Image (spheres, rainbow, N blue to C red):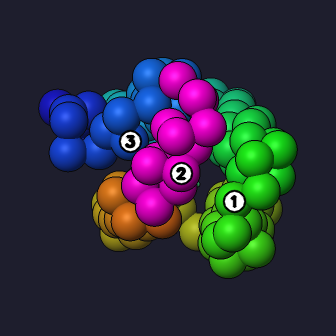
Amino acid sequence: MSLIAWDQSISVNIPSIDTQHQKWIGMINDLYDAMRSGKGKEVVGKILEEMVQYTQTHFAAEERLMRQYGYPEYEQHKLAHDRFVEKVKDLQARNAAGQIALSAEVFTSLKDWLVNHIQTVDRRYAPFLTAKGVR
Ligand code: FEO
């Protein structure tokens, strides 16, 4: 079973952004599957690297849109992104150094952050960006 199942409860109703979120969730699910099926450190490390990179790609795309249209809550949103990137990079470094394992608790924390961020922080920009014509 996937760690995170996509459904309407995590849609922001902007198709281009939902597509990015689906890809991002897919990468976290792949990472979870790799961990659960006991894939080696190299395989897990590679998937983790791709997930960290895509997280930054997605955040940069959202931040561009928010800046482009003058979204008033840009600063708070960017701060939430920056803190999460720090968190996943720290996770990546500690995993590479063998200091922590990617445990069920780590995935629960990733899942909770992501779902909460989409449902609260991302959804706040949805009416604003939709009114600007972003689809
Ligand atoms: Fe979709 Fe603000 O991350």
Q: CA distance from mark 2 to mark 1?
A: 7 Å
Q: Do callouts 3 and 1 mark residues in contact (Cβ within 8 Å)?
A: no
The x, y position of residue 28, in whole percent, is 47, 39
The x, y position of residue 93, in whole percent, is 78, 62
Q: Quadrant of residue 13?
A: top left
Q: Do callouts 2 and 1 mark residues in contact (Cβ within 8 Å)?
A: yes
The residue stretch that appears in magenta: 122-135
Front position in the image: 92 or 73: 73
Q: Which kind of residue does numbered mark 3 sit on?
A: Val
Q: Quadrant of residue 51?
A: top right
Q: CA distance from mark 3 to mark 1?
A: 16 Å
Residue beneath the point at 32% across and 38% down: 11
Q: Main secondary structure of the magenta part?
A: helix
Mark found first going from the N terminus, 2 or 1? 1
Disc 2 vs disc 3: which is toward the camera? 2
Q: Which residue is mark 1?
A: 71
Q: Which residue is mark 2?
A: 128
Mark found first going from the N terminus, 3 or 1? 3
Residue beneath the point at 69% across and 59% down: 71
Residue beneath the point at 53% across and 51% down: 128
- Position of the N terminus, as image quadrant, is top left
Q: Which residue is mark 3?
A: 12
Q: Is residue 49 visible?
A: no
Dot 1: what SS?
loop
Mark found first going from the N terminus, 2 or 3? 3
The x, y position of residue 115, in whole percent, is 35, 56
Q: CA distance from mark 2 to mark 3?
A: 11 Å
- Find out if the beta carbon at label 3 lies less than 8 Å from the nearest ligand 1 atom: yes
